[in-house]
Amino acid sequence: MDHNFLSVQGLAKRYVAGAPPVFEQVSFGIDRGEFVCVIGHSGCGKTTILNVLAGLEAASEGVVIMDRREVKGPSLDRGVVFQSHALMPWFSVLGNVVFAVRSRWPDWSREQAEEHARRFIEMVGLKGAEHKKPSELSGGMKQRVGIARAFSIEPKMLLMDEPFGALDALTRGVVQDELLKICAATHQTVFMITHDVDEAILLADKIFLMSNGPQACIAEVVVNTLPKNRTREGMHHDPQFYRIRNHLVDFLVHRSRQIQAAQASGAVRLPTRIVMPGLEQAAA
């Protein structure tokens, strides 16, 4: 995996000495510009893995290498977007983004920072709302500010923990579309946690499926074979969509629990499978 932009090797996390790890033997690679979604039941350690990648939490075992450097703590090379927008209420939209920009480039003038921030505010569709405070924004608009703030520092990698989970379906769709446009324009590398199967199929190049915890692992890497220019409105008309979706749902409902039961019985853990369900069933 040394050729990958991000290489994760043998990651494990224990919160109590002697207790089974939340997850173990987690290894994967992500290429530069790749969009990866992670799906799994609560308690499998998805957010903990994201926190380790962000440098916000230390793993019990294993190593994370990004762009040939070991991740040992937080860095502006990694932008993070959480489910909660975490905006500073006393700053305007522009002020929130400028604050991030100046943390990245402290020597920039106020004018430089504002010009840079405005570009990303416009990119997320909030031109004209620059001087509004968070209290004047809808939930979807707040989350778009958070996304603009994360992109504005031009991170090498973007980490997103269920960023649209608190939004209604219509707003979520709008923000997903904005994210797709930005990623297409910037070729951003993204690691995103979601519980929404359709969202993962829309956004991701690959989908990591995690077995249930404790002792969770990445059981499968599902390659998204749908065209890159897919849309929410159009992807449902492609037969590959239903093959991929059925595969993901079947894993969450059945196979994730079967893997957990096998692990508890002491069965040998199988290596991570790489599957292309969108094409496999068509060829069968």
Image: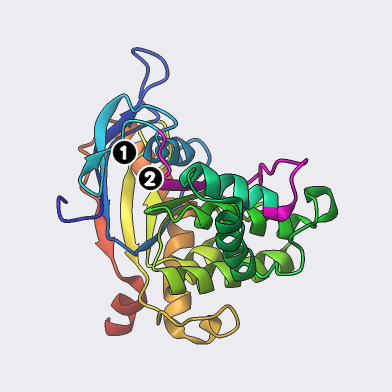
Q: How far apart are marks 2 and 1 (CA)?
A: 6 Å
Left or right for 161, reference 254: right
Q: Report if residue 81 is visible in the image.
A: no
**CB contact under 8 Å: marks 2 and 1:** yes
Give the magenta part as a residue range. 74-94
User: Of 117 and 164, which appears nearest the observer?
Assistant: 117
Q: Quadrant of the C terminus?
A: bottom left
Left or right for 138, reference 242: right
Q: Residue 53 appears in which quarter of the rendering?
A: top left
Q: Residue 34 appears in which quarter of the rendering?
A: bottom left
Give the x, y percent position of residue 80. 50, 46
Secondary structure under the numbered disc 2 in the rendered image: helix
User: Of 173 and 3, which appears nearest the observer?
Assistant: 3
Give the x, y percent position of residue 280. 29, 76
Image position of 86 with respect to 140: above or below: above
Q: Which amino acid does label 1 sit on?
A: Ala
User: Of 58 and 226, which appears nearest the observer?
Assistant: 58
Give the x, y percent position of residue 268. 20, 37
User: Of 80 and 93, which appears nearest the observer?
Assistant: 93
Residue bearing the label numbered 2: 258
Left or right for 189, reference 89: left
Residue bearing the label numbered 1: 262
Secondary structure predominantly adopted by residues drawn in magenta? loop
Image position of 280 with respect to 156: above or below: below
Q: Name the outermost residue toward the right.
A: 136
Image position of 99 with respect to 13: above or below: below
Colour basis: rainbow
Q: How crowded is mark 1: few (under 14 residues within 10 Å), some or many (20 or more)?
A: few
Left or right for 173, reference 269: right
Secondary structure under the numbered disc 1 in the rendered image: helix
Q: What residue type is labelled 2?
A: Gln
